[in-house]
Image (cartoon, rainbow, N blue to C red):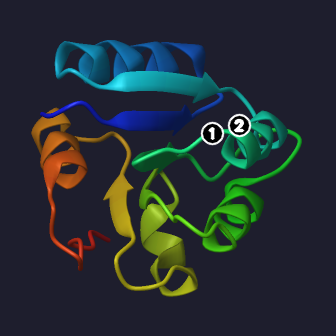
């Protein structure tokens, strides 16, 4: 993986740590947010190539975070990693990658490194 900046938005500390470690090992610079409010703050001040987003979050849910992403001038690739991903496939625009928890690390890695303009959808 070339140097990418990834924002991981996940409230489960173990999953957040796992994603951070996996991404670091693949050469990514990683920021983390444990709730939706913090994620929106980070999106306002930073530029990210990719956002890995859980949907069920404290303070502001994943749909609110996604809404903030869609207003950005430079929109990062959005990868939704959630146990609820398959229930909400129609709520995200084309190009959003949906990965069901528990996730496969290779599938997640492929989604992050893909340069396709229309990322695969998984439901």
Q: Which residue is mark 1?
A: 46
Quarter containing the N terminus? top left
Counting labels gives 2
In the rendered structure, the answer to whether residue 12 lies left or right of residue 93 reads right
Element under disc 2: helix
- Taking depth in this image into account, of 101 and 53 the one nearest to the observer is 53
What residue is shown with label 2? 42
Q: Is residue 116 above or below residue 114?
A: below
Q: Report the mark closest to the observer, 1 or 2.
A: 1
Measured as percent of width and height from the top left, residue 49 is found at: 40, 48
Residue 19 lies, with reference to residue 46, above or below; the image says above
Q: Residue at x 40, y 18 (%)?
A: 20
> x, y percentage for residue 43?
68, 46
Q: Nearer the viewer, residue 120 or 100?
A: 120
Q: Quadrant of the C terminus?
A: bottom left
Residue 82 drawn at (x, y percent): 48, 50
Question: Which residue is nearer to you in this view: 49 or 78?
Answer: 49
Q: Quadrant of residue 96?
A: bottom left
SS for tag 1?
A: loop
Marks 1 and 2, Cα distance to the nearest angstrom? 6 Å
Q: Is the residue marked by circle 1 packed among few (<14), some (14-19), or many (20+) residues within 10 Å? A: few
Q: Residue at x 62, y 73 (%)?
A: 70
* Residue at 35% in and 54% down: 100
Determine whether label 1 and label 2 are within 8 Å by CB: yes
Figure check: 32 above or below 48: above
Q: For residue 13, what is the image quadrant?
A: top right
Residue occupying the point 53% across, 64% down: 74
Q: Is residue 104 left or right of residue 8?
A: left
């Amino acid at each position: 993986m070339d140097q990418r900046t990834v924002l991981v938005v996940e409230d489960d500390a173990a999953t957040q740590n796992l994603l951070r470690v996996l991404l670091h090992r693949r050469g990514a610079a990683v920021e983390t947010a444990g709730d939706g409010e913090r994620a929106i703050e980070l999106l306002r001040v930073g530029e990210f190539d990719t956002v890995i987003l859980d949907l069920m979050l404290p303070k502001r849910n994943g749909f609110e975070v996604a809404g903030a992403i869609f207003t950005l001038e430079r929109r990062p690739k959005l990868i939704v990693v959630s146990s609820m991903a398959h229930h909400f496939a129609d709520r995200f625009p084309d190009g959003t990658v949906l990965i069901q928890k528990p996730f496969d690390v290779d599938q997640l890695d492929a989604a992050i490194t893909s340069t396709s303009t229309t990322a695969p959808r998984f439901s």
